[in-house]
Image (cartoon, rainbow, N blue to C red):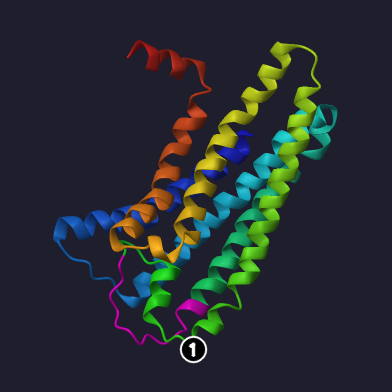
């Protein structure tokens, strides 16, 4: 779990560093200009780090499943080599997905100006600037990434169904509480990440407005990576004691 937390922290740090420094620079120097290369790089790294975070959260769900449902096999199913392979697969999948989506998005011709309505570059805002017919080229890769993301989501739901069934069969209340407590940080981080991303990208068009889109962009790109360390740190007894003293 600590190995996966290290990878999750790196993904969170990368996600924050992709958007926040440029936003601070734009606010301090009162400019919103960004080069096409800079925009492409920002989009790629944002997709890369957020994709890696999602895949790592799915792997961490498998870690919780094995530790609760198959505790005697934990050492063999999740050895150091297996953990390294799963983490490498998460980063590699995120890299390929980000590369395909970024290259295909920036191959579209812009027909409606070059002014984005957000403080960072994201695919929906770039598609609004392109010709309507060219959207068909983008739709080739979106279902591919959507199927991969949906597959991870189904895996997460199935794993937690098995986890809850195993926990409810534990006879002692203390044992059930201990098992649930190991899952609560992961559930909180996963719920925060998925709810903000899904609402930001699947909200009805009637709800769309520049101010709401900006708020939702901040909500899913900045808030989850910033809160993840705090959520996982709350299990640290020394930190909890320090917070209560304050």
**Is 118 positioned to the left or the right of 177 in the image?**
left
Q: How many marks?
A: 1
Q: Quadrant of residue 26?
A: bottom left
When the figure is inspected, residue 57 is found, relative to residue 66, above or below; the finding is below
Q: Is residue 131 above or below residue 46?
A: below
Residue under the image location 59 percent in, 35 percent down: 186
Q: Position of residue 191 (x, y in %)?
A: 55, 41
Q: Quadrant of residue 89?
A: bottom right
* Residue 85 visible: no
Q: Position of residue 45 (x, y in %)?
A: 46, 62
Residue 173 visible? The answer is: yes
State the residue position of label 1: 133
Q: Is residue 47 left or right of residue 71?
A: left
User: Main SS type for the magenta part?
Assistant: loop
Residue drawn 78% across the image and 30% down it: 165
Image position, residue 170 (x, y; %) = 79, 19
| Residue at (43, 47) in percent of width and height | 13
Q: Is residue 93 magenta?
A: no
Q: What segment is highlighted magenta in the picture? A: 104-117
The residue depicted at 49 percent of the width and 24 percent of the height is 234
Choose between 208 and 126: the one closer to the eye: 208
Of 40 and 182, which appears nearest the observer? Answer: 182
């Amino acid at each position: 779990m600590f190995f996966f937390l290290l990878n999750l922290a790196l993904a969170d740090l990368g996600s924050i560093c992709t958007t926040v420094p440029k936003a601070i620079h734009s606010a301090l120097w009162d400019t919103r200009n960004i080069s096409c290369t800079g925009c492409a790089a920002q989009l790629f790294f944002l997709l890369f780090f957020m994709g890696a975070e999602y895949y790592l959260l799915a792997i961490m769900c498998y870690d919780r499943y094995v530790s609760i449902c198959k505790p005697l096999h934990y050492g063999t199913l999740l050895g150091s080599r297996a953990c390294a392979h799963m983490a490498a697969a998460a980063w590699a999948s995120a890299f390929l997905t980000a590369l395909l989506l970024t290259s295909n998005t920036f191959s579209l011709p812009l027909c409606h100006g070059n002014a984005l309505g957000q403080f960072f570059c994201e695919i929906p805002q770039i598609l609004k600037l392109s010709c309507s017919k060219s959207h068909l080229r983008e739709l080739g890769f979106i279902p591919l990434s959507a199927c991969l993301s949906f597959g991870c989501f189904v895996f997460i739901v199935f794993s937690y169904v098995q986890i809850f069934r195993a926990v409810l069969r534990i006879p002692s209340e203390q044992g059930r509480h201990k098992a649930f407590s190991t899952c609560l940080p992961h559930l909180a981080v996963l719920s925060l990440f998925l709810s903000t991303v899904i609402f930001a990208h699947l909200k009805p068009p009637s709800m769309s407005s520049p101010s709401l889109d900006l708020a939702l962009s901040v909500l899913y790109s900045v808030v989850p990576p910033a809160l993840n360390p705090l959520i996982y740190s709350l299990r640290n007894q020394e930190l909890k004691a320090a917070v209560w003293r304050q």
